Image (tube, rainbow, N blue to C red):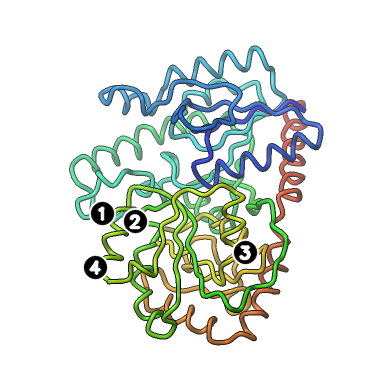
Amino acid sequence: MKILRITSIGFEGGGSDNGIILVDKVLRRMGHTVKILTSNLRSDLPHFSDFEFKALDYQPHVLKLFYRSFYPNSYFALRKVLKEYQPDIVQLHTMSQVSPSVLFLLKKYPTVMTIHGAEDFTPSLLLWSFPKTCFKDDQYKLSGLNFSGWLHYVYHRYINGAIYRFGFRNVDLFIVFSQYMKNLMKVDHIESVCVPNATKLFEYEPIDLQSNLIAYVGRIEKFKGVQYLIESMPNIIKRYSDIRLDIAGTGPYENQLKLLTKELGIESHVNFLGHLNRGQLHDLYRRLKILIVPSVWPEPFGKVGIEAMSLGRPVIASDAGGMSEWLVDGETGYLVPPENSSAIADKVIRILSTPGMLQEMSLNARSRALDFDIEQHAQIIVKLYNDVAEKNKQ
């Protein structure tokens, strides 16, 4: 099968891009031909794309908003790729650099779209796709929008969103990664199939009981809630004076978090690691006792937790979005209320102070992670490809 996958960026900038890379490796091992079309955003980084178009972010500001609805660069790039490659199936992923213009080229092609999270066409999550400059008080709520934010909201909600809906006539199947997202998309009048997210699992390794390392892995944005994890540290330090927190990732909120650690006087306990590759992440997971995923926003899935659990590391995560669908509270870790630093501290101390429970959670975490293996995920995706292709022949 000749597969064409389309997404916004061609470098590994987050979980969705990592997932594309991992699935593509499996698809190729299964004998399929895979090509990828992306923007050329951040051409200074290694790209996994086969075809590229000029990134929307590089366009003049006055044109950028208009191009969010119909972007000539992605449109003509895809038209050329379709003519030359003639794929059997097209799969769309993130669309922020792509725009709905490409949808109108896909009428004759079996097409699947994976909804990874907040996009212009997801009204329930729309505000989470806006830059923080759209908000008066950095709160992702309608009441927090400034004038520019309201312009963005009206444009994307009622104009760009309508264009997406019109173009969706050419999408045969929508895929989401959690039941939470399936229910949310149904509210937004998008019927979808839930295929739980997955990753390439690491090998299980027993926890080093002498370690007192906890960690966060992911982008450093305010809505990722890392500030609440940092604010939990003074209470944890009172009980465990040698506790260490490693923060792996980069993002626009990093400097504010560094200032927060200084204000709290805990700089010697917190280490900012920057971006880590998969090998470096493996080493971090091996050394830590607990991974914390303190998101404020409703994570569509939260795949990083599965990576840590595959080694047998318990996870403490916010009870937000789809994370309760892979984290079994009290068995593979704990769910805590979002924006609650005291709850994070309480659960960290509880796990660290009970070695027997820590080891039991470690085994439970490994067992649960086996349900989210990338090989199984890819097989389900291929079956859906075949179903869509067969339906289009009728």
Q: Residue placed at 59% from the left, 71% from the top? A: 314
Q: Are marks 1 and 2 in contact (CB under 8 Å)?
A: yes
In the image: residue 88, left or right of residue 191:
right
What kind of element bears circle 1?
loop
The residue type indicated by label 1 comes to Asp
Quadrant for residue 269, please give it.
bottom left
4 or 1: mark nearer the eye: 4
What is the C-alpha distance between the residues marked 4 and 1? 20 Å
- SS class of the residue under badge 2? helix
Measured Cα–Cα span from mark 3 to mark 2: 27 Å
Q: Position of residue 133 (x, y in %)?
A: 25, 44
Mark carried by residue 222: 2
Of the numbered discs 1 and 3, the one sitting upstream in the chain is 1
Mark carried by residue 33? none
Q: Nearer the viewer, residue 78 or 105?
A: 78
Q: The disc labelled 3 sits on which kind of residue?
A: Arg
As drawn, the label of residue 138 is 1
- How many angstroms separate mark 1 from mark 2 (CA)? 8 Å
Please tell me which of labels 2 and 4 falls first in the chain: 2
- Quadrant, the C terminus: top right
Q: Secondary structure at mark 4?
A: helix
The relative height of residue 315 versus residue 135 in the rendered view (above or below) is below
> How far apart are labels 2 and 4 at the CA level?
17 Å
Number of the front mark, 2 or 4: 4
* Residue 362 place in picture, x, y as percent: 66, 74
Residue marked by disc 3 = 286
Residue of label 4: 263
